[in-house]
Image (cartoon, rainbow, N blue to C red):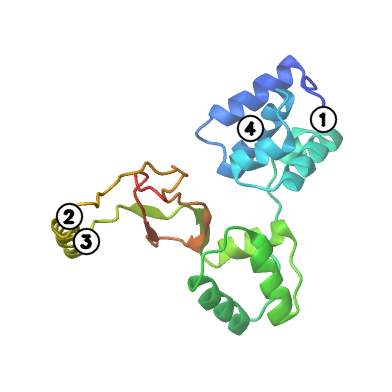
């Protein structure tokens, strides 16, 4: 557990200046922001969700800062490595992803391991998806339009029912239970720049 308040006033001012500076690189400013949030008492998991990273990355930044200081953490010495998948495998994976809506990397990692025999960690899969041009977001909700033909057919059936009732017959209306029925779009992996949509249902419909 990382305890809050580990920064001195001068260290905090230095990091705050980096976050506010327009000259600082995006990655460097994000690391400064993460260290400040840790000093405020936020957890690694909460910061990772806010910055769209994994919590191991946040812990690694904190460890580097505590062991080597801000000068070491502010240097972006990362170099990309060769992909563990071939170009053909990546193309096949993209086609597979385009045909479904995966809500987490668990399903994607299981598919990669089964089909290609390559095991990815959560953070490694996030980097792979980003490089292949996928992003994690919600589909757009499209209102479902009522079918005029079906409504007209129901009205005709209802009127025939009423007109055909016997003297000892009656139509009764009963209330229904009201479960949560409306469509709720959820986050998932989609191609960057695409506009996925899901048809929504009315929350006023009842189920008897």
Residue lying at the far top of the rendered structure: 9
Tell me the CA gap for discs 2 and 3.
23 Å
Tell me the CA gap for discs 3 and 1.
57 Å
Instruction: From the image, state whether disc 1 or disc 2 is nearer to you.
Output: 2
Is 36 above or below relative to 47?
above
Tell me the CA gap for discs 2 and 4.
69 Å
Which numbered marker is on residue 147? 3
Count residues near mark 1 (Cα–Cα under 10 Å), then give few for <14, some for 14-19, many for 20+: few
Q: Residue at x 68, y 77 (%)?
A: 85
- Judged from the image, the secondary structure of the residue bearing numbered disc 3 is loop
Is 101 above or below relative to 17?
below
> Which numbered disc flags the more N-terminal residue, 2 or 3?
3
Instruction: From the image, state whether disc 2 or disc 4 is nearer to you.
Output: 2
Q: Nearer the viewer, residue 112 or 84?
A: 112
In the image, 179: left or right of 48?
A: left
Q: Residue at x 72, y 15 (%)?
A: 9
In the image, 109: left or right of 151?
A: right
Q: Which residue is mark 2?
A: 162
Q: Which residue is mark 1?
A: 2
Q: Is residue 82 visible?
A: no
Q: Residue at x 24, y 56 (%)?
A: 145
Tell me the CA gap for discs 1 and 2.
72 Å
Q: Nearer the viewer, residue 86 or 175?
A: 175
Instruction: From the image, state whether disc 3 or disc 1 is nearer to you.
Output: 3
Is 81 above or below relative to 14?
below
Q: Which residue is mark 4?
A: 33
Tell me the CA gap for discs 3 and 4.
51 Å
- Judged from the image, the secondary structure of the residue bearing numbered disc 2 is helix
The image position of residue 46, as x and y in percent, is 67, 36
- Residue 96 occupies quadrant: bottom right
> Which numbered disc flags the more N-terminal residue, 3 or 1?
1
> Which numbered disc flags the more N-terminal residue, 2 or 4?
4
């Amino acid at each position: 557990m990382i305890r809050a308040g580990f920064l001195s006033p001068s260290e905090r001012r230095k990091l705050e200046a980096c976050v506010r500076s327009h000259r600082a690189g995006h990655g460097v400013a994000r690391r400064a922001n993460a260290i400040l949030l840790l000093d405020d008492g936020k957890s690694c998991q909460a910061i990772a969700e806010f910055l769209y990273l994994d919590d191991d990355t946040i812990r690694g930044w904190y460890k580097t800062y505590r062991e080597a200081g801000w000068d070491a953490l502010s240097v972006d010495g990362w170099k990309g490595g060769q992909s563990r998948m071939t170009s053909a495998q990546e193309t096949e994976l993209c086609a597979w992803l385009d045909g479904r809506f995966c809500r987490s990397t668990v399903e994607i990692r299981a598919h990669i391991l089964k089909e290609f025999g390559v095991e990815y960690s959560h953070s490694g899969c996030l980097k792979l998806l980003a490089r292949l041009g996928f992003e994690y977001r919600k589909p757009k909700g499209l209102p479902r339009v009522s079918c005029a033909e079906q409504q007209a057919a129901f009205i005709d059936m209802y009127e025939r029912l009423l007109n055909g009732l016997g003297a000892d017959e009656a139509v009764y209306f009963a209330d229904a239970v009201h479960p949560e029925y409306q469509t709720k779009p959820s986050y998932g992996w989609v191609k960057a720049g695409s506009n996925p949509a899901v048809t929504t249902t009315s929350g006023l419909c009842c189920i008897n």
